[in-house]
Amino acid sequence: MKECNVYVTRMLPKPAMELLKENCQVEINPEDRVLSKKELLEKVKGRDAVLCLLTDTVSEKVLEAAGPACKIFANYAVGYNNIDIKSATKGGIIVTNTPGVLTNTTADLAWSLLFAVARRIVESDKYTREEEFKGWAPMLFLGRDITGKTLGVIGTGRVGANFAKKSKGFEMKLLYNDLRRNEKFEEETAATYVDKETLLRESDFISIHVPLLPTTKHMIGKKEFKLMKKTAVLINTSRGPVIEEKALVKALKEGEIWGAGLDVYENEPALESGLAELDNVVIVPHIGSATVETRTSMALMAAKNIIAVLKGETPLQCVNPEVLKKIG
């Protein structure tokens, strides 16, 4: 076990790195940046395991470069659209992720964005810091009420359900849309299942919590913005491409919706032209899971998955379980 060779594509919280070093030979990318395609291809060669990030594009070529000795790519994220799962499965490589540990944290950020947009926190902060504040005024930075309003949740997986449950404290009417009705979720939240169009038309606040799939790409675009209330606030902490960013910029500029709060972007890290200049959008740099506790838990989960696989055990999480049968 100790002779096993692990590559980590970026420095992660210390407890996880120490755990790996106790069990394996470990090399870590010393620079706080994403590796280039060429660097990644070179660095994964001959490894028994790779701990990668959502920002690493693990293509078929990268998996092939890792070679026959490689048993696992442990992704430091819940999502795994950065990895060619089909090629990994074909090559007998286990792919794991880090679900569960970031549910509360990401839902909390969605609420943070919702409040920041509704109450114009970022604009107000900037205004005050620049010493523009001369005293209380009746029309200064008027926002939108949250308590008692209608909240629309698109996607009721772990994060979406957690986010929705937290609306109880604000006495909100809850609407939701998903691939199918979720009766357990309805019992827990008193939410009402509606089609997407109804949710968009009736909600004061809309929060997106869906995975990135061919069916969810651009699920919110020009047509959908026209359905929304002019007072609506849109929040996205899921994946950037589920919103057509060009259409969002237009909707915000032309007042089709009140505002938006974004943690993710269509062509991340690049922003759609004009987005950063708008006052009615709050933009943060993909920090949904960014707390000390959660990022440490994610790193430990990824490290434990690697150690389990290298010991010949079943990992805690596996997104391509058919490989386990194949190598079983």
Image: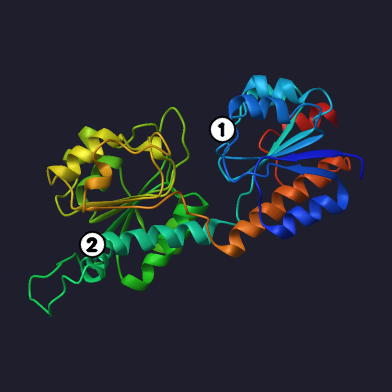
Residue 137 in picture, x, y percent from top left: 9, 76
Residue 79 vs 17, above or below: the answer is above
> Which mark is first along the chain, 2 or 1?
1
The answer to whether residue 222 is visible is yes
Residue 168 in picture, x, y percent from top left: 37, 69
Q: Residues within 10 Å of mark 2 (few under 14, many from 20)?
A: some
On the rendered image, what quadrant is the C terminus found in? top right
Residue 190 in picture, x, y percent from top left: 38, 62
- Judged from the image, the secondary structure of the residue bearing numbered disc 2 is helix
In which quarter of the view is residue 293 placed? bottom right
- Judged from the image, the secondary structure of the residue bearing numbered disc 1 is loop
The answer to whether residue 149 is visible is no
Left or right: residue 57 versus residue 284 is right
Left or right: residue 35 versus residue 104 is right
Nearest to the eye among marks 1 and 2: give it.
Answer: 2
Label 1 sits on what residue type?
Asn
Residue at far bottom of view: 135
Residue 11 vs 80, above or below: the answer is below
Q: Residues within 10 Å of mark 1 (few under 14, many from 20)?
A: some
Q: Nearer the viewer, residue 19 or 240?
A: 19
Left or right: residue 156 versus residue 205 is right
Q: Residue at x 81, y 27 (%)?
A: 46
Spatial CA distance of label 1 from label 2 is 34 Å
Label 2 sits on what residue type?
Glu
The residue to which callout 1 is attached is 82
Q: Which mark is residue 161?
A: none
Left or right: residue 73 versus residue 260 is right
Residue at far left of view: 138
Q: Residue at x 34, y 39 (%)?
A: 271
The residue to which callout 2 is attached is 123
Q: How is the image coloured?
A: rainbow
On the rendered image, what quadrant is the N terminus found in? top right
